[in-house]
Image (cartoon, helix red, strand yellow):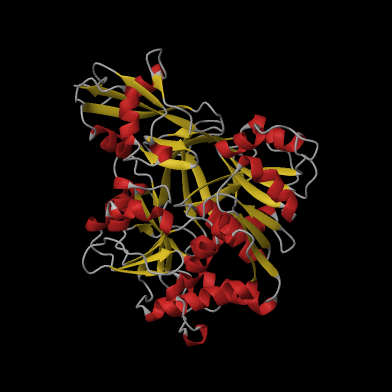
Amino acid sequence: MQANPLTLQSVLDARVQAHPERPFLDFVGGAGDGTSWTWSDARTAAMSLAAGLQEEGVEAGAHVAVMLPNGPDFIRSWFALGYLGAVMVAVNTEYMGAFLERVLTHSEASTLIIDAAYVPAFLAVAERCVDLRHVIVSQPAPVPALDVPPGMRVSTLDACVGDPNRLRPAAVSSGDTACIMYTSGTTGPAKGVMMPEAHVMLCGQGAVEQLGVNRDDCYYVCLPLFHINALGMQMCAVMNAGARAVIRERFSASAWLADIRAHGCTVTNMLGALADFVVATEPSDVDRDHALRLITVAPSVPVLVDAFLERFGVTDVCALYGMTEVNIPLYSEPGKPLKPGSSGRLYDSAFDLSIVDPETDEARAVGEIGEIVVRPKRAFGFMQGYFRQPDKTVEAWRNLWFHTGDAAWQDADGDVFFVDRIKDCIRRRGENISSAMIEAEIGALEGVVECAAVAVPAEDGGGEDDILIAYVVESAATSEALWRAAADRLPGFANPRWWRAVASLPKTPTNKVRKQALRDEGVTADTWRAPGR
């Protein structure tokens, strides 16, 4: 094993050794509201849970699904699995139905740590989760009486706490798989990205090296920890820098500035429409009364960038580009004006990046649109592949480059400008959503003959999408009735905003749906709009 591996375990141990009683985490909202941890508190909580899980049989390499909101239970579970060398399967807390079943069954998770609020969604698919042997519910004692399949045991998270002095930490290396995160499938079910320890930690190291995050900073984390932006870029930046974090259970536009002011936060990330929600709040005389010095945005919509600079008086608004598979290869530079629409420049000590013809892989000239392809320079700074989908892994790699499926162009200064997604994927509320998954669930509704989901520009801005579903029915089912029925099968972010009944879907001579035709038509006069969420 290499000396001083870049792992969660080694970084946390180093911080505790350097300053055990230094403030580390403050939790806002939810069950953990008002809880504060020092670095020593965090490690003790993690090692205590790790000791208990170890006694329950969780070993190095075991897959443990975690379906928890932002809060102390998420953090101690994540850290505990790091000490055990187990693989955290991060589960989107809005998942239900086929979305949730896909993650729990495909990941081969043997243990599930789940918040009590999400148990009903799990029970609806529990019979098909044949690999699960232990369900650990985050709720006070006693153990809930759940109707789970035979052979599946139920306990509570607090009951799994053990003696930290009895823990036998695993010998974890930088290349060991730390986490599996499921991303949208473009033409099929979601794919599990296998992320090495160094990959996750490098997400945060990039923020330290490229953005100047340091031990005096306080990171405001309001994005969900089951995604790499909050888990890797934000929390791992805090860990690499020895900084402090304030973790809100769930994003709230109305609480955003109040939290930042109350806790002295200096850095935060905005993703997609969330920035638009903050800017849409009523201006006040305290908009500039804060310590916030840096915000990152993705995408960098000029009107929102200007609002943070001018209305809120933030010193630096920086852009970035990344995806779960490829880490974060692009950052803009603090202290320099952000070019309108730029996603930043290459983090060249850690990655190579090129803009190429998506068909031939020939490099595009300056100013020409092509596909973003990336490869790592640092060991294990990239995904290991798609779990149990070697064909998809090979498909994504060609000519020794990972093909992102994203279209962009680069100027003479090296700034990269994101244009659109080449893949048939929809981005909504920070989620990459598979149109195939939406179509499968809505297509299963009574009366629906066929349907097609496409992206249309979002009403609320942020450079994101709304979802339009065009459908053919053989019954009198209305758009509203179908939307309500779909709510029982789809997460809220995946239930279409726009519903359009059509006599038939446009097809190619080979009977494939011509989705571009639907995108070109967009929201027509006969399209029904679902109520706002």
Residue 361 appears in the picture as rendered: no
Q: Residue furthest top?
A: 525
Give the x, y percent position of residue 78: 49, 66
The correct choice, above or below, for 210 with respect to 442 in the image is below
Q: Quadrant of residue 309?
A: top right
Residue 520 appears in the picture as rendered: yes
In this figure, what is the number of numbered marks? 0
Q: Quadrant of residue 36?
A: bottom right
Looking at the image, which is closer to me, 11 or 40? Answer: 40
The correct choice, above or below, for 113 with respect to 249 in the image is below
Give the x, y percent position of residue 14: 62, 76
Give the x, y percent position of residue 230: 55, 54
Q: Is residue 385 left or right of residue 370?
A: left
Looking at the image, which is closer to me, 98 or 410? Answer: 98
Q: Residue furthest bottom?
A: 166
For image coordinates 41% across by 12% down, the residue present is 525
Q: Is residue 305 left or right of residue 371?
A: right
